[in-house]
Amino acid sequence: MITVLGSLGQVPRDQEKPKPTTRILFVFDASQSMYGRWQSDTKFNIAVKLFSALLDSLKLQTNLELALRMYGHQKPFPPQDCNDTRLEVPFGKDNIARIKHTLKTTIPKGTTPIAYALSQATKDFPPCDNCRNIVILITDGLEECGGDPCAVSLELQKKGIMLKPFIVGIGKDFRKQFECVGTYFDASNETEFRNALKVIISRALNPTTMQVNLLDAYGKPTETNVNMTFYDNFSGLIKYNMIHSFNAKGLPDTLDIDPLMTYDIVVHTIPPVRKDSVKLTAGKHTTIGIDAPQGYLLFKASGNSSLKYLPCLIRKKGSDETINVQQFDQVEKYLTGSYEVEILCMPRIIVNDVDIQQSHTTSVEIPMPGIAVIQKSTNGYGSLYLEGKNGLVWLYNFRDNQQMQETLYLQPGSYRVVFRSKYSNKASYSIEKSFKIESGQTFNLKLYPN
């Protein structure tokens, strides 16, 4: 939101962005195999009991919504029904009791369409601008319907529909098969199942912070006030844009960042710098350093002349890529190093080996230009040239319109004009005139027939 300052010039209060709502969709296996014996009871009964205890611990959690999708619970096997999945409890507040009741009254009976269940989960998350979508899959078996859970999971993550899923494998280690789907937890016994659920919820809900130190040439975190873009390393989607800041103690600000993904961070210095594959630990503070030493570049003309709207092209030394177009009346920050600049005056001026140093302002000075006022008696065709040692260097074509006078800012030097009226039908009628420009002086040139 943009706040317009009032007539008294009050400074608007900062408004912190509200915390995102975490939405956890539990995809619960209720296939026939979940009736198998495991430890003290059937797999399904134990899973429901431990899962219900976890749900009870979440009753007071804020900014949290839960939903339940099940598969293998509607049609008996055989025959095999590979479309057997349904959202039993949609997202909403205070629906834990409903989820527990649904699980308690369900009888496992069908097959295991994991890929199809995950693909249908895309419909379970209503549109939301400030939500984290998490899927927790609880299963005791592998895909039985020929689907590809890995491909489905990757597609949903790339589209930004959900974060990397969590998978809890009951009774047998399915790590090799599920590592491509998401973060896998093996639950070979009841204790491991209980612990896996606790760890997953902790990762999903515990506050996680990070600090980005933008390091100067001396390795100190003194650089700031530049935008940082956080990309999801897997999908390439933008997750955060934040202008780097110092807190009241003069230290880099603490950021609240989702720990469930790996980030590529681009710091939009000129040119930009990046740090890829940044991982956070849920519930802990992570500090990372990114080299971003910067200095300043200023263009000025000799004397007291103030030039505006004169573009200057900036390139890294040895590169043809233009990284910025800086106006003459601007002071801009760049990463330390060597640059080449091209000042788009007439004639153009190229300066090599412009050295940007840490916290230092490098000045590039050019002679104060003069002014050439070109007056024409008629419309026509013509050009302005710089008189060089090796001949004429083209600079400018006159405008073929109704304007009888053109004013040009030129660097000190010798120039020549060649012009022919559009009403003359012989090349020999061309007018050719030479003149000189001095700093700060105005020269009037009349292109009248002899």
Image (cartoon, rainbow, N blue to C red):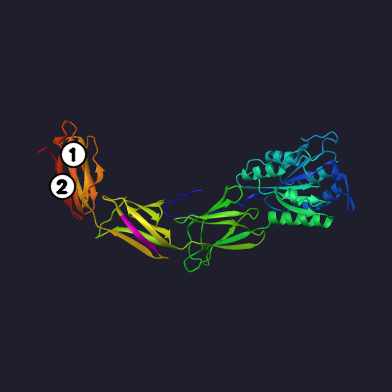
> In the rendered structure, does residue 277 fall within the stretch colored magenta?
no
| In the image: residue 240, left or right of residue 27 | left
Residue 266 seen in the current view: yes
User: Can you give x and y, in whole percent of width and height, for residue 183 in the image?
Assistant: 71, 52
Q: Please tell me how crowded label 1 is: few (under 14), some (14-19), or many (20+) other residues with Cα within 10 Å.
A: many
Residue that badge 1 annotates? 419
Q: How many marks?
A: 2
Q: Residue at x 65, y 53 (%)?
A: 260
Disc ID at residue 319: none
Residue to which mark 2 is pinned: 434
Looking at the rendered structure, the secondary structure element under dot 2 is strand
Compared across the picture, whether 285 is left or right of 95 comes to left
- Amino acid type assigned to the residue bearing label 1 in the image: Phe
- Rendered location of residue 57, percent (x, y): 77, 54
* Circles 2, 1 touching at the beta carbon (< 8 Å): no
The C terminus sits in image quarter: top left
Q: Main secondary structure of the magenta part?
A: strand
Res. 106 in view: no
Locate residue 305, reporting x and y percent. Answer: 25, 57
- Magenta-colored span: 350-356
Residue at 47 percent across and 66 percent down: it is: 217
Quadrant in the rendering for residue 152: top right
